Amino acid sequence: CNGFHELLDWQIIQYRESVNEHRADLSKAEGRCVSWQEAEKDFTAHDLGVMSEKWRVEYCGLLCEHRSNCFMAARFMAGRETERIRVAG
């Protein structure tokens, strides 16, 4: 992966934004201010796996400047195509 460091930086931003959104949603649902650490723990337990895959597909397939010459980008996009065919079929 030629854009590995850029990917990590971008994923950190996505992660922090997602935990913040999750924190706001939990706080509203529970009627109290949920700590960032509590929201992070809940997000990691319930959403991180799905979101990590989504972020990789988005970054590697759409944003990375190296995507046209990258084995990982091709792999993630092929997996996405397989999933789309399975859901449609």
Image (cartoon, rainbow, N blue to C red):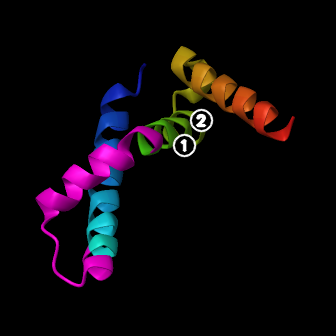
Q: Quadrant of residue 76?
A: top right
Q: Main secondary structure of the magenta part?
A: helix
Q: Determine whether the residue tagged by mark 2 lies in a helix, strand or loop.
A: helix
What range of the chain is rendered magenta? 27-50
Q: Residue at x 29, y 74 (%)?
A: 24
Q: Position of residue 83 (x, y in %)?
A: 70, 32
SS at badge 1: helix
Residue 68 position by quadrant: top right
Three-letter amino acid code at disc 2? Gly
Q: Position of residue 33 (x, y in %)?
A: 16, 79
Residue 61 against residue 38 in the figure, above or below = above
**Front position in the image: 48 or 70:** 48
Residue 62 vs 60, above or below: the answer is below
Determine which residue is flagged by label 2.
Answer: 61
Residue located 68% across and 23% down the image: 78
Q: Which mark is residue 58?
A: 1
Residue 33, above or below 12: below
Marks 1 and 2, how far apart at CA:
5 Å
Image quarter where the N terminus lies is top left
Q: Is residue 10 visible?
A: no
**In this rendering, is residue 43 above or below 2?**
below
State the residue lying farthest toward the right: 89
Q: Position of residue 25 (x, y in %)?
A: 34, 73
Is residue 25 found inside the magenta-colored segment of the image? no
Q: Nearer the viewer, residue 24 or 11?
A: 24
Amino acid type, callout 1 = Glu
Q: Residue at x 59, y 35 (%)?
A: 61
User: For the residue carrying disc 1, how many other residues have a C-alpha within 10 Å: few (<14), some (14-19), or many (20+)?
Assistant: some
- Horizontal placement of 48 versus 86: left or right? left
